[in-house]
Image: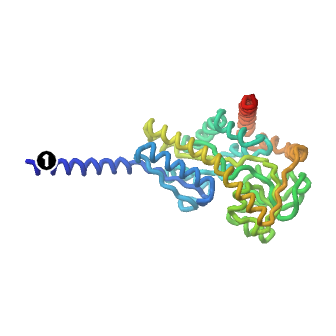
Amino acid sequence: MLKKTLKSLVLATLMAGTASMALAQEITLRATANSNDQDEDYDGLVVFKNYVENASNGAIAVELFIGTQLCAKGDECLAGVADGTIDVYISTSGGAAGLFPYIQVLDLPYLMSDDRVAEAVLTQTDFTKTLRGMAMADSGNKIRLMTIGNTGGWRNYANTKQRVTAPADLSGLKMRTVPADLPQFLATTLGAAPTPIPWPELFTSLQTGVVEGTANGITAIMSMKFPDAGLKYLTLDGHSYMGAFWWMGQDRFASLTDAQKQIVVDGFAALQQATFASPKRKEIQAYADFKSAGGEVYVPTAEEKAAFKSAVAPVMDWFKTNVKGGPEVLAAFDASVAAAQAIVDAERAEDLQ
């Protein structure tokens, strides 16, 4: 009798363990970033994975694919999100502009003053919700924008030729851009010669003179070792915030229980905070390394920055005229920036009391 009882308990325990393992393996989210393990995107995904797996007690697993294992380009990756072969994907605005051109609004220059304002726009206004609704409609309810984080800080002008202190200094400069209309028009407006070059080819293009400049954050510049390719001059004009758009398949999201959805949403909130913090920490060493490699960092005066802002005014009209949904999304963005600026100004005033 005792043997039978023990045998029954052992079997029950084994069956319970098997059921528990089945539950733990029931949901696996496949998440990809076309970057590397030194990137803010990777930092965000690690935080997301840790949060979701722990908060779900192992019921939701997150499998990371860093690089181009699942897809290599924005349109290809977003197609994977839509058809369910990819669950989570991070894109830049340029990477998703083919399907959602209006998200390039974050690339419009000199609309946000600093990190506090940018982060308030993305966490304390309805801006992300507005873009989510537009993207859902344009993807046939297949692609859901989960959050917007940061990938590399702010775009700054960097080049191999000379210090840039005024728009005229960019005249004729062969400037690398992504293959999207807005950054090419921006370069043209400033008198530069826009040259679309894939990111993996930029080092060689700088080295051989195919391009002479780029607009990136310091962490990206140093992770790619661009000073070794001749990049020497960096002007911290901070003309646009380098937004990271985190997408998830709507069918996949809808298939989750309400409790699981909450875990995933909270996981993206943790991811967002990680991507806000990561470039701030990494840029300390990156600036030191850039200077050690012979690089020159220039901080424009308020007057010089105002001259850049004045020079790019036509870009705003171009965006409203040429980008589908441009007027609506720019109006929403301007309103969100104004609201965020008011929030930050009030917080700063209160902190001084």
Residue 232 drawn at (x, y percent): 81, 63
Q: Name the residue at the bottom extreme.
A: 208
Using residue 149 as the reference point, say whether residue 60 is left or right of it: left
Residue 98 drawn at (x, y percent): 67, 50
Residue 292 drawn at (x, y percent): 77, 65
Please say which color scheme the image uses: rainbow
Residue shown at the point (62%, 35%) measured from the top left:
129
- Number of numbered markers: 1
Residue topped by disc 1: 5
Residue shown at the point (86%, 52%) measured from the top left:
190
Bin the neighbour count of mark 1 within 10 Å (Cα to Cα): few under 14, some 14-19, many 20 and up.
few
Q: Name the residue at the left extreme.
A: 1
Q: Secondary structure at mark 1?
A: helix
State the image quarter where residue 174 is shown. bottom right
Quarter placement of the C terminus: top right
Q: Is residue 211 visible?
A: no
Residue 260 position (above or below residue 61)? above
State the image quarter where residue 110 is shown. top right
Q: Is residue 260 visible?
A: yes
Amino acid on which the number 1 mark rests in the picture: Thr
Residue shown at the point (80%, 66%) measured from the top left:
294
